[in-house]
Image (spheres, rainbow, N blue to C red):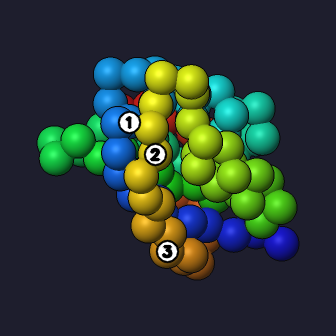
Amino acid sequence: MQSAVHIIVKGLVQGVGFRYFVYRKAVSYGLKGFVRNLVNGDVEIVAEGDRSLVEELIKDTKVGPRAAHVLDLKLEWQKPTDSYRDFGMG
């Protein structure tokens, strides 16, 4: 079943390779969407694809790369839009 999620990640998640980590995981799962830094220091992720693979990305995101320290994840499940051709990094 296709699913979509919007995630805001809070903590030490900029300048530690977090976006690259999420990007590599999302691409390996065949997900579509994006990951980008926000000006307030958070990271925003939108991921669409098979629900089980989106859930795997969420698990990965809770841990992040070794240098990151995730304090909080805000999740909002959404209806897939099918507007993304691939997974991008901004």
Disc 1 vs disc 2: Cβ atoms closer than 8 Å? yes
Please name the residue that numbered disc 2 is placed on: 70
The spot of residue 88 in percent (x, y) is 49, 35
Q: How many residues crowd mark 3 within 10 Å: few (<14), some (14–19), many (20+)? A: few
Task: Identify the disc placed on residue 76.
Answer: 3
The mark total stands at: 3
Q: Earlier in the sequence, mark 3 or mark 1?
A: 1
Number of the front mark, 2 or 3? 2
Q: Amino acid at mark 3?
A: Glu
- Does dot 1 land on a helix, a strand or a loop? loop
- Cα distance in 3D space between marks 2 and 3: 17 Å
| Frontmost residue, 65 versus 86 | 65
Q: Amino acid at mark 1?
A: Val
Q: Is residue 11 above or below residue 6?
A: above
Disc 3 vs disc 1: Cβ atoms closer than 8 Å? no
Q: Residue at x 56, y 66 (%)?
A: 5
The spot of residue 6 in percent (x, y) is 48, 64
Q: How many residues crowd mark 1 within 10 Å: few (<14), some (14–19), many (20+)? A: many
Side of 39 where 60 appears, left or right:
right
Q: Residue at x 35, y 45 (%)?
A: 11
The spot of residue 38 in percent (x, y) is 24, 44
- Cα distance in 3D space between marks 3 and 1: 19 Å
